[in-house]
């Protein structure tokens, strides 16, 4: 389990590298909207962040309504910064793969399963209505797989598919998470595990 200090150091390292890059090229490569000369506007799940340059400081645009500051988890900040650091202007390839097929995934497979797949099945395996309701709130696109399946564009170039088979008295619920094969060129296997877990838990919050 990563400590807060680990995320602080990871953010510092990412910012130091991003500060050397051309800001417009970062926007073009990631698909993020460059709000002004010194900021990006980033949609992540159901929240919108402003990232100001050159410090790459994060703020939640909902705080502008006078309700006060909204905490942005360091894990989310680091994940977004890592996506911004991706070197190649990759677009999704249209080939869907399991987590095991992502380079370096074998080391993080157990944390990925505990963080994303198990919660997906436990929370929604017998609550497909809640899954569909939450997915619609995150602009999920229905797909014809499983008893319920949705595709989410979590970043402009990173789609993720969540698929569920409903449980019953005889069989336990089953679920799977699929990724476009290009994700391995944009994020590390560890980051992908975190991203999948964030998506599942955001859906869980929206289903209540």
Image (tube, grey):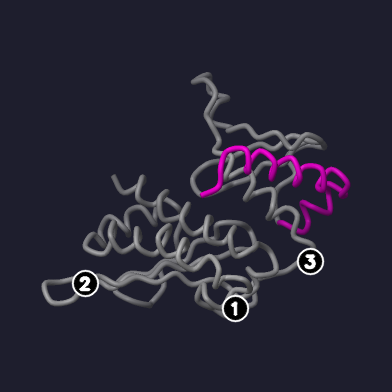
Q: Which residue is mark 3?
A: 88
The residue lying at 11 percent from left, 72 percent from top is 169
Mark 2 or mark 3, whichever is nearer to me: 2
| In this rendering, position of residue 30 left or right of residue 37 | left
> Residue 155: percent from the left, percent from the top?
60, 56
| In this rendering, position of residue 173 left or right of residue 151 | left
Q: Is residue 5 magenta?
A: yes
Along the line of sight, which residue is nearer the eye, 156 or 55?
55
Q: Which mark is residue 172?
A: 2
Most common secondary structure along the magenta stretch: helix
Q: Quadrant of the C terminus?
A: top left
Q: Which residue is mark 1?
A: 94
Magenta region: 1-30
Vertical comparison of 178 with 65: above or below? below
Q: Secondary structure at mark 3?
A: loop
**How far apart in space, not on screen, are marks 2 and 3 (Cα)?**
41 Å
The residue lying at 61 percent from left, 38 percent from top is 49
């Amino acid at each position: 389990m990563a400590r807060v200090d680990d995320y602080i150091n990871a953010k510092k390292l990412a910012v130091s590298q991003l500060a050397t890059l051309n800001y417009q090229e970062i926007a073009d490569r990631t698909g993020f909207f460059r709000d002004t000369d010194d900021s990006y506007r980033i949609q992540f799940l159901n929240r919108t962040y402003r990232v100001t340059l050159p410090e790459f400081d994060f703020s939640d645009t909902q705080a502008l309504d006078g309700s006060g500051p909204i905490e942005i988890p360091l894990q989310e900040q680091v994940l977004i910064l890592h996506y911004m650091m991706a070197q190649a202007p990759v677009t999704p390839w249209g080939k869907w793969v399991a987590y095991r097929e992502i380079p370096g995934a074998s080391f993080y497979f157990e944390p990925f399963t505990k963080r994303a797949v198990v919660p997906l099945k436990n929370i929604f395996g017998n609550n497909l209505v809640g899954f569909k309701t939450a997915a619609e709130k995150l602009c999920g696109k229905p797909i014809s797989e499983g008893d319920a399946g949705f595709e989410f564009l979590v970043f402009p170039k990173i789609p993720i598919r969540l698929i569920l088979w409903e449980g019953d008295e005889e069989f336990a619920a089953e679920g799977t998470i699929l990724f476009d094969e290009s994700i391995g060129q944009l994020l590390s296997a560890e980051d992908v595990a975190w991203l999948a877990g964030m998506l599942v838990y955001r859906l869980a919050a929206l289903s209540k």
